[in-house]
Image (tube, rainbow, N blue to C red):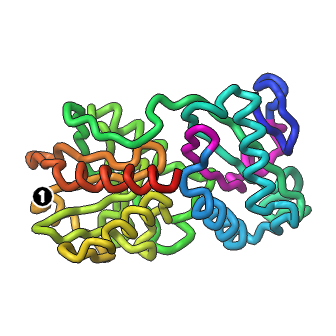
Amino acid sequence: MVNYNGTILTLAKSQLSIQNRGYKYGDALFETLKVVNGKIFFWEDHYFRLMSSMRIMRMDIPMSFTMEFLEDEINKTLFANDLLQSSARLRINVDRGEGGLYLPSDNAKIGYNISAEPLENPFYSIDTNASCVVDLYKDYYIAPGLLSGLKSNNKAIQIIGSIYAKENDFDNCLLLNTNKSVVEALNGNLFLVKDGHIKTPPLEEGCLKGVMRKQILALLAEDVNITVEEAPISPFELQKADELFVTNVIKGIVPITKYRKKHYTSDFAQTLINKLNAKLRLQS
């Protein structure tokens, strides 16, 4: 069941028009949420990122789009899919409806839809037996700047990068910007660990303004024994690192196990994910 502008519909009846601007031009934004027993992880951060992204895209935000309204719509969707008492992956899409060419005919005509599917794990974990082999994806590059960090429906690089990874038996790929700096992975933000020093690309490099990235930076700031730096990462630094890991809201932290000839440990990532789960338990 899908929530289409506040109405619960079956998937068959919820099909978007081919005139929808999200389909025609990628004129849409989305948020991917993790929900456990009706509790939305980091809901405030997701909500404000969505509102900020809508402003950047010059969408007229409806007065009804309060945090409480959207949370009610999320719970309505979970209830319709019998997921209120379990773990779920949920996606909110916001678009500008129909009309116009590149210039919208009605900038205030904002629509939304919400879909949900079950997730296995309520909390985050690292499978120490799992591999995550990566390489650089160099066919196309991300433009530096905050526009690249939006969760928009224009994900061409991530799509063809994922196909490239599958064709070459990689589990993921690392993306570069036009300055040839490493920006992020296909599905999350990148962190580099070297001798107790943690590094992640700044938002200005073109990386996603990740909600989990924000949580990890906050956890790292609490530890006086490590230093954290938001700075560009050169491809040459990857093979010198002790650990590399990718973060996103659904999986939490995914350690990279191999890049080219370099193998990595995951001890720091495991410690960090334990802290993340402890924080979530305190908030639940």
Q: Is residue 95 above or below residue 16?
A: below
Could you tell me residue 62's position as x and y percent?
86, 64
Viewer can see residue 208: yes
Decide if residue 61 is on the left or right side of residue 223. Answer: right
Circle 1: element type? loop
Horizontal arrangement in the rendering, residue 80 relative to residue 97 (left or right): left
Of residue 26 and residue 229, the one placed in the foreground of this image is 229
Magenta region = 16-38
Where residue 114 appears, as percent x and y from the top left, is: 72, 41
* In front of the other: 39 or 5: 39
Bin the neighbour count of mark 1 within 10 Å (Cα to Cα): few under 14, some 14-19, many 20 and up. some
Residue at point 33%, 59% (across, down): 190
- Residue for point 67% across, 55% down: 29
Q: Residue at x 83, y 29 (%)?
A: 9
- Label total for image: 1
- For the N terminus, the image quarter is top right
Q: Is residue 37 magenta?
A: yes
In the image, residue 3 lies at what x, y percent? Answer: 79, 38
Residue 138 in sight from this viewpoint: no
- Determine the image quadrant of residue 76: top right
Q: Position of residue 194 (x, y in %)?
A: 14, 66
Would you say residue 4 sits in the magenta stretch? no
Of 75 and 192, which appears nearest the observer? Answer: 75
Give the residue type at disc 1.
Answer: Asp
Q: What residue is shown at x 60% (from left), y 59% (from top)?
A: 46
Q: Which residue is mark 1?
A: 242
